[in-house]
Image (cartoon, helix red, strand yellow):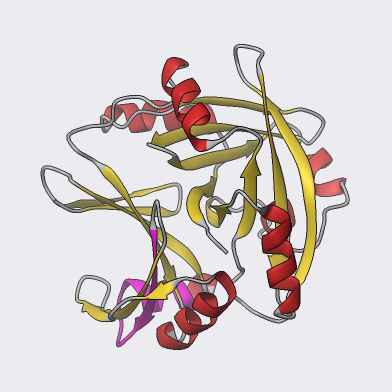
Amino acid sequence: MTLSFDHLVHFVDEPKEVITLLKNKRIHAVEGGVHEGRGTYNALSYFDLSYIEYLGTYDRELVAGAEHLHHSLIETVVNNKFKEGFVRFAARTTDIEGVAKSLKEQGLSVNGPVPMNRKRPDGSIISWQLLYVGEENDSLQLPFIIQWDDNDDKRRQEQVEKGIIGKQPEKLDFAGVTFAVIDAEKTAEKWSRYLGLEVAEAYVDPELNAIVQVLTLAGGDLYFASPIGEGVVAKVLAELGECPFQVNFSGAKEPVTFELFNGRYHFEK
């Protein structure tokens, strides 16, 4: 199984508002488009092919009232009662059927692949397939799996030509996502087994007051943080339970961290 980081979903009330707020911080973001008939739309901020999707609703009653596949992204959004913040992330594959088979063989609940599409502001249609994966009674949800209809090279060229992948500040790179978890070592070991990812050496993050276990993933690593005392991670666990709470970037001129719609954005040199 070969996976790459594809995108992190940040649910927000007004995706278009995010574009302006990010522009004020010199971060490039654009309108994504509408998921017609499904009640949602988005804005996007790309860092090469890894990106953040700012997902919102244009018809919340439609979203809440529709039947959703188990372990789907929208099921998570509805169960979270449309609370703003980071929701889930998608891992990219070029063999979604093979991934489905592997995960089923490991005893996971697997739904899909499901064909999806979105109309861009210029009227063009982009399409993909999604696979929803999970295990029952687990507080930290696994990623959903995405396979785009076009290959990476074609997608990159098209996104650049359309201005979707734009120039980000300095040499800013997408570094990955941090999750608040009760047991970083145990969670990393389990996700490593399920997803076929390598476990890197753990370290202590004094800013988070947590021990952090890393899984290496092309396009954006996964950081599992367990508290070693009071602090950011302990607060997230107490208020939200196990979940993604921080997105990380490298290559900034100066280290800085800010909050945006219940999500923590962390920049390092």
Q: Which residue: 38% across, 82% down?
A: 226
Nearer the observer, 133 or 158: 158
Q: Is residue 183 magenta?
A: no
**Residue 79 visible, this angle:** no
Q: Judge from the rendering whether residue 210 lies leftward or rightward of residue 136; answer left or right.
A: left
- Check the image and report above or below for 4 versus 124: below
Name the quarter where the N terminus is drawn.
bottom right
Q: Is residue 231 magenta?
A: yes
Q: Judge from the rendering whether residue 225 lies leftward or rightward of residue 102; answer left or right.
A: left
Nearer the observer, 218 or 175: 218
- Check the image and report above or below for 243 versus 170: below
- Check the image and report above or below for 45 versus 262: above
Q: Which residues are magenta?
A: 221-237
| Residue 58 spot, x, y in % from top left | 70, 31
| Residue 129 spot, x, y in % from top left | 71, 44
Q: Which residue: 26% across, 29% down?
A: 26
Q: Which residue: 59% across, 75% down?
A: 194
Q: Judge from the rendering whether residue 116 lies leftward or rightward of residue 203; answer left or right.
A: right
**Residue 204 visible, this angle:** yes
Q: Quadrant of residue 88?
A: bottom right
